[in-house]
Amino acid sequence: MKPTLDPEIHARRRRRLMRRIGKTGIAILPTAPVCYRNRDADYPYRPDSDFYYLTGFPEPEACLVMVPGHPEGEVWLFVRPRDPEQETWTGRRAGVEGALRDYGADVAHPINELDQRMPELLSHRRRVYFPLGRDPAFDRRVGEWLNQLRAKTRSGVHVPTEFVALDHLIHEQRLIKGREELRLMKQAAEISMEAHRRAMRACQPGMMEYQLEAEYLHTFRRHGAVPAYNTIVAGGANACILHYTNNDQPLQAGDLVLIDAGAEYGLYAADITRTFPVDGRFRPAQREIYQLVLEAQRAAIAAVRPGNPWNAPHEAAVHVLTEGLVAIGLLEGEVEALIADQAYRRFYMHRTGHWLGMDVHDVGEYKEGDDWRTLKPGMVLTVEPGLYLGEERDIPRRYRGIGVRIEDDVVVTRDGCRVLTEALPKTIDDIEALMAS
Ligand code: GLY
Ligand code: MN
Ligand code: MN
Protein backbone atom coordinates (compact mmCIF):
# COMPACT_ATOMS: atom_id res chain seq x y z
CA MET A 1 0.00 0.00 0.00
CA LYS A 2 3.06 2.26 0.33
CA PRO A 3 3.74 4.98 -0.55
CA THR A 4 1.25 7.03 1.35
CA LEU A 5 0.33 10.68 1.08
CA ASP A 6 0.71 13.12 3.95
CA PRO A 7 -2.37 12.76 6.23
CA GLU A 8 -2.85 16.53 5.87
CA ILE A 9 -3.65 16.02 2.17
CA HIS A 10 -6.49 13.68 3.05
CA ALA A 11 -7.63 16.12 5.74
CA ARG A 12 -7.71 18.96 3.22
CA ARG A 13 -9.83 16.86 0.85
CA ARG A 14 -12.28 16.08 3.65
CA ARG A 15 -12.53 19.73 4.66
CA ARG A 16 -13.30 20.71 1.08
CA LEU A 17 -15.99 18.07 0.82
CA MET A 18 -17.47 19.02 4.19
CA ARG A 19 -17.86 22.61 3.04
CA ARG A 20 -20.12 21.26 0.29
CA ILE A 21 -22.04 19.03 2.65
CA GLY A 22 -22.70 21.75 5.23
CA LYS A 23 -23.91 21.53 8.81
CA THR A 24 -27.29 20.11 7.88
CA GLY A 25 -25.71 17.16 6.08
CA ILE A 26 -23.95 13.93 6.97
CA ALA A 27 -21.79 11.77 4.67
CA ILE A 28 -21.36 8.02 5.00
CA LEU A 29 -18.75 6.13 2.98
CA PRO A 30 -17.77 2.49 3.53
CA THR A 31 -14.63 1.05 1.96
CA ALA A 32 -14.52 -1.93 -0.41
CA PRO A 33 -15.13 -5.46 0.90
CA VAL A 34 -12.58 -8.27 0.65
CA CYS A 35 -13.26 -10.30 -2.51
CA TYR A 36 -12.75 -14.03 -2.68
CA ARG A 37 -11.10 -15.82 -5.59
CA ASN A 38 -12.19 -19.25 -4.40
CA ARG A 39 -13.32 -20.60 -1.02
CA ASP A 40 -11.31 -18.71 1.56
CA ALA A 41 -8.52 -17.55 -0.79
CA ASP A 42 -8.95 -13.82 -1.25
CA TYR A 43 -7.85 -11.43 -3.98
CA PRO A 44 -5.18 -8.94 -2.95
CA TYR A 45 -7.11 -6.30 -1.03
CA ARG A 46 -7.62 -2.87 -2.58
CA PRO A 47 -9.56 -0.14 -0.75
CA ASP A 48 -12.37 1.75 -2.42
CA SER A 49 -10.84 4.69 -4.30
CA ASP A 50 -13.25 7.31 -2.91
CA PHE A 51 -12.78 6.08 0.65
CA TYR A 52 -9.00 5.99 0.27
CA TYR A 53 -8.93 9.43 -1.36
CA LEU A 54 -10.53 10.88 1.78
CA THR A 55 -8.78 8.80 4.45
CA GLY A 56 -5.61 7.05 3.23
CA PHE A 57 -6.89 4.17 5.36
CA PRO A 58 -5.78 0.89 3.78
CA GLU A 59 -7.72 -1.79 5.68
CA PRO A 60 -11.02 -3.49 4.82
CA GLU A 61 -14.13 -3.31 7.06
CA ALA A 62 -14.00 0.41 7.62
CA CYS A 63 -16.47 3.25 7.24
CA LEU A 64 -15.95 7.02 7.17
CA VAL A 65 -18.71 9.25 8.53
CA MET A 66 -18.40 13.02 8.18
CA VAL A 67 -20.67 15.13 10.37
CA PRO A 68 -19.81 18.81 9.82
CA GLY A 69 -20.14 20.84 13.01
CA HIS A 70 -20.81 17.85 15.30
CA PRO A 71 -19.75 18.81 18.85
CA GLU A 72 -17.90 15.50 19.45
CA GLY A 73 -15.98 15.75 16.18
CA GLU A 74 -16.58 16.00 12.45
CA VAL A 75 -14.60 13.01 11.17
CA TRP A 76 -15.65 9.60 12.47
CA LEU A 77 -13.87 6.40 11.46
CA PHE A 78 -15.25 2.96 12.19
CA VAL A 79 -12.49 0.34 11.89
CA ARG A 80 -11.52 -3.21 12.85
CA PRO A 81 -10.35 -3.12 16.48
CA ARG A 82 -6.90 -4.35 17.45
CA ASP A 83 -6.97 -8.11 18.06
CA PRO A 84 -3.62 -9.82 18.68
CA GLU A 85 -4.92 -13.27 17.79
CA GLN A 86 -6.52 -12.15 14.49
CA GLU A 87 -3.50 -10.01 13.65
CA THR A 88 -1.32 -13.13 13.89
CA TRP A 89 -3.32 -14.54 10.99
CA THR A 90 -4.19 -11.58 8.78
CA GLY A 91 -1.71 -8.84 9.64
CA ARG A 92 -1.41 -5.68 11.67
CA ARG A 93 -4.36 -3.40 12.20
CA ALA A 94 -4.41 0.31 12.94
CA GLY A 95 -7.28 -0.18 15.36
CA VAL A 96 -9.26 2.59 16.95
CA GLU A 97 -6.05 4.08 18.39
CA GLY A 98 -4.34 4.16 14.99
CA ALA A 99 -7.40 5.69 13.30
CA LEU A 100 -7.18 8.59 15.77
CA ARG A 101 -3.39 8.91 15.77
CA ASP A 102 -2.49 8.34 12.11
CA TYR A 103 -5.60 8.86 9.97
CA GLY A 104 -7.05 12.12 11.19
CA ALA A 105 -10.20 10.75 12.83
CA ASP A 106 -11.72 13.00 15.50
CA VAL A 107 -13.70 10.04 16.82
CA ALA A 108 -13.07 6.34 16.17
CA HIS A 109 -15.01 3.22 17.10
CA PRO A 110 -14.92 -0.49 16.29
CA ILE A 111 -16.73 -1.23 13.03
CA ASN A 112 -19.17 -3.56 14.82
CA GLU A 113 -20.62 -0.50 16.61
CA LEU A 114 -21.70 1.14 13.34
CA ASP A 115 -25.34 -0.06 13.46
CA GLN A 116 -25.68 0.99 17.06
CA ARG A 117 -24.21 4.51 16.60
CA MET A 118 -25.51 5.59 13.20
CA PRO A 119 -29.18 6.37 14.07
CA GLU A 120 -28.02 8.89 16.69
CA LEU A 121 -25.58 10.50 14.22
CA LEU A 122 -28.31 10.74 11.59
CA SER A 123 -30.77 12.48 13.88
CA HIS A 124 -31.14 16.24 13.40
CA ARG A 125 -29.45 16.10 9.97
CA ARG A 126 -31.53 17.00 6.96
CA ARG A 127 -29.48 15.56 4.10
CA VAL A 128 -27.71 12.20 3.88
CA TYR A 129 -24.86 11.92 1.38
CA PHE A 130 -23.88 8.36 0.60
CA PRO A 131 -23.03 6.19 -2.42
CA LEU A 132 -26.65 5.50 -3.27
CA GLY A 133 -27.16 2.24 -5.15
CA ARG A 134 -23.53 1.13 -5.12
CA ASP A 135 -24.15 -1.72 -2.68
CA PRO A 136 -27.76 -2.83 -2.14
CA ALA A 137 -26.91 -4.37 1.24
CA PHE A 138 -25.49 -1.03 2.44
CA ASP A 139 -28.51 0.87 1.06
CA ARG A 140 -30.71 -1.43 3.17
CA ARG A 141 -28.61 -0.80 6.25
CA VAL A 142 -28.98 2.96 5.87
CA GLY A 143 -32.73 2.38 5.48
CA GLU A 144 -32.79 0.43 8.74
CA TRP A 145 -30.98 3.22 10.62
CA LEU A 146 -33.55 5.68 9.34
CA ASN A 147 -36.42 3.39 10.36
CA GLN A 148 -35.04 3.21 13.86
CA LEU A 149 -35.06 7.02 13.94
CA ARG A 150 -38.56 7.25 12.51
CA ALA A 151 -39.79 5.12 15.38
CA LYS A 152 -38.63 7.88 17.70
CA THR A 153 -40.10 10.94 15.99
CA ARG A 154 -42.69 11.33 18.74
CA SER A 155 -39.85 12.08 21.15
CA GLY A 156 -38.89 15.04 18.95
CA VAL A 157 -36.16 13.45 16.83
CA HIS A 158 -35.79 14.81 13.27
CA VAL A 159 -35.30 12.31 10.47
CA PRO A 160 -33.32 13.24 7.34
CA THR A 161 -35.52 13.97 4.36
CA GLU A 162 -33.07 14.22 1.45
CA PHE A 163 -30.66 11.71 -0.03
CA VAL A 164 -27.79 12.85 -2.20
CA ALA A 165 -25.31 10.81 -4.27
CA LEU A 166 -22.04 11.36 -2.44
CA ASP A 167 -20.03 9.84 -5.30
CA HIS A 168 -20.78 12.73 -7.60
CA LEU A 169 -19.30 15.33 -5.23
CA ILE A 170 -16.16 13.27 -4.56
CA HIS A 171 -15.71 12.48 -8.25
CA GLU A 172 -15.76 16.11 -9.31
CA GLN A 173 -13.10 16.73 -6.67
CA ARG A 174 -10.99 13.76 -7.87
CA LEU A 175 -11.14 14.93 -11.48
CA ILE A 176 -8.66 17.75 -10.86
CA LYS A 177 -5.37 16.29 -9.68
CA GLY A 178 -3.14 18.07 -7.19
CA ARG A 179 0.64 18.26 -7.24
CA GLU A 180 1.11 15.22 -4.97
CA GLU A 181 -1.26 13.15 -7.07
CA LEU A 182 0.59 14.08 -10.25
CA ARG A 183 3.83 13.04 -8.61
CA LEU A 184 2.42 9.57 -7.91
CA MET A 185 0.98 9.35 -11.42
CA LYS A 186 4.37 10.27 -12.84
CA GLN A 187 5.94 7.47 -10.80
CA ALA A 188 3.31 5.01 -12.02
CA ALA A 189 4.14 6.16 -15.56
CA GLU A 190 7.91 5.76 -15.02
CA ILE A 191 7.50 2.20 -13.73
CA SER A 192 5.21 1.34 -16.64
CA MET A 193 7.62 2.82 -19.18
CA GLU A 194 10.48 0.80 -17.74
CA ALA A 195 8.37 -2.33 -18.12
CA HIS A 196 7.50 -1.52 -21.75
CA ARG A 197 11.17 -0.94 -22.57
CA ARG A 198 12.11 -4.21 -20.93
CA ALA A 199 9.42 -6.08 -22.89
CA MET A 200 10.52 -4.54 -26.20
CA ARG A 201 14.06 -5.70 -25.54
CA ALA A 202 13.01 -9.18 -24.38
CA CYS A 203 10.63 -9.89 -27.25
CA GLN A 204 11.64 -12.78 -29.55
CA PRO A 205 9.69 -14.83 -32.08
CA GLY A 206 8.50 -18.09 -30.52
CA MET A 207 7.92 -16.60 -27.07
CA MET A 208 4.47 -16.96 -25.58
CA GLU A 209 2.38 -13.84 -24.99
CA TYR A 210 2.36 -14.60 -21.24
CA GLN A 211 6.13 -14.58 -21.20
CA LEU A 212 6.10 -10.95 -22.27
CA GLU A 213 3.42 -10.28 -19.64
CA ALA A 214 5.88 -11.68 -17.08
CA GLU A 215 8.32 -8.87 -17.93
CA TYR A 216 5.67 -6.35 -16.83
CA LEU A 217 4.82 -8.16 -13.62
CA HIS A 218 8.50 -8.41 -12.82
CA THR A 219 9.09 -4.69 -13.30
CA PHE A 220 5.91 -3.62 -11.50
CA ARG A 221 6.62 -5.71 -8.43
CA ARG A 222 10.28 -4.69 -8.32
CA HIS A 223 8.99 -1.16 -7.70
CA GLY A 224 6.22 -2.09 -5.29
CA ALA A 225 3.53 -1.54 -7.93
CA VAL A 226 0.78 -3.85 -9.19
CA PRO A 227 -0.98 -3.97 -12.57
CA ALA A 228 -3.58 -1.20 -12.73
CA TYR A 229 -5.75 -3.49 -14.93
CA ASN A 230 -5.39 -6.83 -16.67
CA THR A 231 -2.41 -6.70 -19.01
CA ILE A 232 -3.16 -7.17 -22.70
CA VAL A 233 -0.43 -8.91 -24.73
CA ALA A 234 -1.95 -9.48 -28.16
CA GLY A 235 0.18 -10.93 -30.94
CA GLY A 236 -0.91 -10.65 -34.60
CA ALA A 237 -4.66 -10.55 -35.16
CA ASN A 238 -5.32 -10.94 -31.39
CA ALA A 239 -4.71 -7.19 -31.31
CA CYS A 240 -8.11 -6.76 -33.00
CA ILE A 241 -9.81 -8.17 -29.88
CA LEU A 242 -9.96 -5.03 -27.75
CA HIS A 243 -10.02 -6.68 -24.32
CA TYR A 244 -7.84 -9.68 -25.18
CA THR A 245 -6.30 -10.90 -21.91
CA ASN A 246 -5.82 -14.64 -22.51
CA ASN A 247 -2.20 -13.92 -23.45
CA ASP A 248 -1.63 -17.61 -24.18
CA GLN A 249 -0.55 -17.71 -27.84
CA PRO A 250 2.93 -17.87 -29.40
CA LEU A 251 4.39 -14.70 -30.89
CA GLN A 252 5.33 -15.04 -34.53
CA ALA A 253 8.05 -13.38 -36.61
CA GLY A 254 6.48 -10.95 -39.05
CA ASP A 255 3.58 -10.10 -36.69
CA LEU A 256 3.06 -7.07 -34.52
CA VAL A 257 2.33 -7.39 -30.82
CA LEU A 258 0.07 -4.89 -29.06
CA ILE A 259 0.68 -4.47 -25.33
CA ASP A 260 -1.64 -2.44 -23.12
CA ALA A 261 -0.13 -2.45 -19.64
CA GLY A 262 0.11 0.03 -16.80
CA ALA A 263 1.21 0.01 -13.18
CA GLU A 264 -0.77 1.16 -10.18
CA TYR A 265 1.52 2.90 -7.70
CA GLY A 266 0.32 4.38 -4.42
CA LEU A 267 -3.20 3.70 -5.78
CA TYR A 268 -2.65 5.82 -8.92
CA ALA A 269 -2.72 4.25 -12.38
CA ALA A 270 -0.76 4.52 -15.58
CA ASP A 271 -2.30 3.22 -18.80
CA ILE A 272 0.06 2.75 -21.74
CA THR A 273 -0.18 0.90 -25.04
CA ARG A 274 2.64 0.25 -27.45
CA THR A 275 2.54 -1.86 -30.61
CA PHE A 276 5.80 -3.22 -31.99
CA PRO A 277 7.10 -5.93 -34.34
CA VAL A 278 7.79 -9.31 -32.70
CA ASP A 279 11.10 -9.62 -34.58
CA GLY A 280 12.04 -5.95 -34.29
CA ARG A 281 11.36 -4.85 -37.92
CA PHE A 282 8.10 -3.26 -39.12
CA ARG A 283 6.87 -4.69 -42.47
CA PRO A 284 5.72 -2.21 -45.14
CA ALA A 285 1.94 -2.62 -44.57
CA GLN A 286 2.45 -2.47 -40.80
CA ARG A 287 4.46 0.75 -41.23
CA GLU A 288 1.60 2.37 -43.15
CA ILE A 289 -1.00 1.53 -40.51
CA TYR A 290 1.32 2.32 -37.60
CA GLN A 291 2.34 5.69 -39.02
CA LEU A 292 -1.30 6.60 -39.54
CA VAL A 293 -2.21 5.80 -35.92
CA LEU A 294 0.85 7.72 -34.73
CA GLU A 295 -0.19 10.80 -36.71
CA ALA A 296 -3.73 10.52 -35.35
CA GLN A 297 -2.29 10.34 -31.84
CA ARG A 298 -0.11 13.40 -32.41
CA ALA A 299 -3.09 15.37 -33.70
CA ALA A 300 -5.15 14.26 -30.69
CA ILE A 301 -2.44 15.23 -28.19
CA ALA A 302 -2.13 18.64 -29.88
CA ALA A 303 -5.85 19.13 -29.13
CA VAL A 304 -5.36 18.65 -25.37
CA ARG A 305 -5.30 22.15 -23.91
CA PRO A 306 -7.39 24.14 -21.46
CA GLY A 307 -10.52 25.58 -22.97
CA ASN A 308 -10.92 22.81 -25.54
CA PRO A 309 -13.93 20.52 -25.18
CA TRP A 310 -13.36 16.95 -23.97
CA ASN A 311 -14.16 15.65 -27.43
CA ALA A 312 -11.54 17.71 -29.31
CA PRO A 313 -8.79 15.05 -29.17
CA HIS A 314 -11.25 12.38 -30.37
CA GLU A 315 -12.40 14.52 -33.25
CA ALA A 316 -8.81 15.27 -34.24
CA ALA A 317 -7.93 11.55 -34.21
CA VAL A 318 -11.03 10.55 -36.16
CA HIS A 319 -10.22 13.13 -38.81
CA VAL A 320 -6.66 11.91 -39.37
CA LEU A 321 -7.69 8.24 -39.30
CA THR A 322 -10.55 8.72 -41.76
CA GLU A 323 -8.35 10.65 -44.20
CA GLY A 324 -5.73 7.93 -43.96
CA LEU A 325 -8.24 5.10 -44.41
CA VAL A 326 -9.44 6.79 -47.59
CA ALA A 327 -5.88 7.32 -48.81
CA ILE A 328 -5.04 3.62 -48.50
CA GLY A 329 -8.38 2.51 -49.95
CA LEU A 330 -9.98 0.98 -46.85
CA LEU A 331 -12.77 3.56 -46.98
CA GLU A 332 -14.28 5.12 -50.07
CA GLY A 333 -16.02 8.47 -50.23
CA GLU A 334 -15.71 12.01 -49.06
CA VAL A 335 -13.93 12.45 -45.71
CA GLU A 336 -16.48 14.74 -44.01
CA ALA A 337 -19.37 12.50 -45.04
CA LEU A 338 -17.54 9.39 -43.84
CA ILE A 339 -16.93 11.09 -40.48
CA ALA A 340 -20.58 12.15 -40.23
CA ASP A 341 -21.63 8.53 -40.96
CA GLN A 342 -19.01 7.20 -38.53
CA ALA A 343 -17.72 4.92 -41.29
CA TYR A 344 -14.37 4.73 -39.46
CA ARG A 345 -16.04 2.76 -36.67
CA ARG A 346 -15.58 -0.49 -38.50
CA PHE A 347 -11.81 -0.06 -37.95
CA TYR A 348 -11.79 2.28 -34.93
CA MET A 349 -14.60 1.33 -32.58
CA HIS A 350 -13.55 2.88 -29.28
CA ARG A 351 -13.09 6.42 -28.10
CA THR A 352 -9.77 8.25 -28.03
CA GLY A 353 -9.40 8.37 -24.26
CA HIS A 354 -10.78 8.51 -20.76
CA TRP A 355 -9.97 10.20 -17.46
CA LEU A 356 -7.08 8.60 -15.61
CA GLY A 357 -6.35 8.67 -11.88
CA MET A 358 -6.89 6.31 -8.96
CA ASP A 359 -9.11 4.24 -11.25
CA VAL A 360 -7.81 3.44 -14.71
CA HIS A 361 -11.12 4.58 -16.18
CA ASP A 362 -11.26 7.38 -13.68
CA VAL A 363 -14.25 9.22 -12.31
CA GLY A 364 -15.69 12.56 -13.36
CA GLU A 365 -18.38 13.49 -15.84
CA TYR A 366 -17.54 13.87 -19.53
CA LYS A 367 -20.44 16.18 -20.20
CA GLU A 368 -21.86 19.24 -18.50
CA GLY A 369 -25.51 19.22 -19.39
CA ASP A 370 -25.65 18.44 -23.10
CA ASP A 371 -22.16 19.73 -23.88
CA TRP A 372 -18.77 18.07 -23.66
CA ARG A 373 -16.99 19.46 -20.66
CA THR A 374 -14.12 21.90 -21.03
CA LEU A 375 -10.57 20.71 -20.35
CA LYS A 376 -8.96 22.39 -17.32
CA PRO A 377 -5.46 22.29 -15.82
CA GLY A 378 -5.01 19.28 -13.53
CA MET A 379 -7.23 16.93 -15.50
CA VAL A 380 -5.46 13.75 -16.64
CA LEU A 381 -6.59 11.71 -19.63
CA THR A 382 -5.34 9.01 -21.95
CA VAL A 383 -4.92 9.57 -25.68
CA GLU A 384 -5.21 6.21 -27.40
CA PRO A 385 -6.29 6.03 -31.02
CA GLY A 386 -6.02 2.71 -32.83
CA LEU A 387 -6.88 0.84 -35.99
CA TYR A 388 -8.08 -2.74 -36.00
CA LEU A 389 -8.15 -4.35 -39.42
CA GLY A 390 -9.79 -7.75 -39.01
CA GLU A 391 -9.31 -10.76 -41.20
CA GLU A 392 -12.42 -10.28 -43.35
CA ARG A 393 -11.98 -11.00 -47.04
CA ASP A 394 -12.88 -7.52 -48.24
CA ILE A 395 -9.81 -6.13 -46.47
CA PRO A 396 -6.75 -6.21 -48.79
CA ARG A 397 -4.62 -9.20 -47.83
CA ARG A 398 -1.57 -7.12 -46.90
CA TYR A 399 -3.51 -5.30 -44.17
CA ARG A 400 -5.42 -8.29 -42.78
CA GLY A 401 -5.04 -8.95 -39.07
CA ILE A 402 -3.13 -5.76 -38.28
CA GLY A 403 -4.13 -4.13 -35.00
CA VAL A 404 -2.35 -1.01 -33.72
CA ARG A 405 -3.01 1.20 -30.70
CA ILE A 406 -0.73 3.85 -29.24
CA GLU A 407 -1.70 5.13 -25.80
CA ASP A 408 -0.14 7.83 -23.65
CA ASP A 409 -1.12 9.59 -20.42
CA VAL A 410 -1.55 13.33 -20.65
CA VAL A 411 -2.01 16.09 -18.04
CA VAL A 412 -3.77 19.30 -19.00
CA THR A 413 -1.50 22.20 -17.99
CA ARG A 414 -2.04 25.97 -17.90
CA ASP A 415 -0.80 26.45 -21.45
CA GLY A 416 -1.37 23.08 -23.11
CA CYS A 417 -0.46 19.64 -21.90
CA ARG A 418 2.32 17.46 -20.58
CA VAL A 419 2.69 13.85 -21.70
CA LEU A 420 3.63 11.80 -18.62
CA THR A 421 4.69 8.88 -20.83
CA GLU A 422 6.59 10.96 -23.38
CA ALA A 423 9.94 9.23 -22.78
CA LEU A 424 8.72 5.84 -24.04
CA PRO A 425 9.67 5.31 -27.72
CA LYS A 426 6.80 5.32 -30.19
CA THR A 427 8.17 6.35 -33.58
CA ILE A 428 9.02 3.47 -35.92
CA ASP A 429 12.71 4.38 -35.87
CA ASP A 430 12.89 4.71 -32.09
CA ILE A 431 11.11 1.39 -31.52
CA GLU A 432 13.33 -0.46 -33.99
CA ALA A 433 16.42 1.10 -32.44
CA LEU A 434 15.36 0.13 -28.90
CA MET A 435 14.55 -3.43 -29.95
CA ALA A 436 17.94 -3.77 -31.63
CA SER A 437 19.79 -2.51 -28.53
N1 GLY B 1 -6.42 -0.38 -20.54
C1 GLY B 1 -7.73 0.04 -20.69
C2 GLY B 1 -7.83 1.19 -21.60
O1 GLY B 1 -6.91 1.45 -22.35
O2 GLY B 1 -8.78 1.91 -21.59
MN1 MN C 1 -4.89 0.98 -22.00
MN1 MN D 1 -6.89 3.54 -21.71
Image: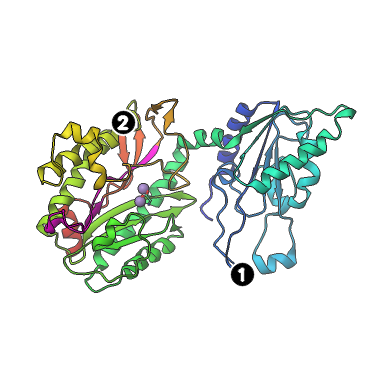
Is the N terminus in the top left, top right, bottom left or bottom right quadrant? bottom right
**Residue located 12% across and 59% down the image:** 397
Q: Residues within 10 Å of mark 1 (few under 14, many from 20)?
A: few
Task: Report whether residue 429 is seen.
Answer: no
Residue sitting at the far front: 393
Q: Residue 203, image x and y in percent? A: 25, 67
Instruction: Tell me the distance, in whole angstroms, between the alpha carbons under discs 2 and 1.
Output: 49 Å
* Location of residue 41 by image quarter: bottom right
Q: Which mark is residue 305?
A: 2
Q: Residue 141, image x and y in percent? A: 72, 45
Q: Which mark is residue 350?
A: none
Q: Nearer the viewer, mark 2 or mark 1?
A: 1
Query: Which one is nearer the viewer's eye here, 333 or 171?
Result: 333
Query: Which one is nearer the viewer's eye here, 345 or 253?
Result: 345
Q: Earlier in the sequence, mark 2 or mark 1?
A: 1
Q: Residue 25, image x and y in percent? A: 69, 29
**Residue located 44% across and 47% down the image:** 184
Query: Which one is nearer the viewer's eye here, 422 or 247?
Result: 247
Secondary structure beneath dot 1 equals: loop
Q: Is mark 2 within 8 Å of ligand 3?
A: no
Secondary structure beneath dot 2 equals: loop
| Horizontal side of residue 365 vs 236, given as left or right | right
Is the C terminus in the top left, top right, bottom left or bottom right quadrant? bottom left
Query: Which one is nearer the viewer's eye here, 277 or 68?
Result: 277
Q: What's under tag 2, amino acid-wise? A: Arg
Q: Which mark is residue 39?
A: 1
Q: Residue 349, image x and y in percent? A: 30, 46
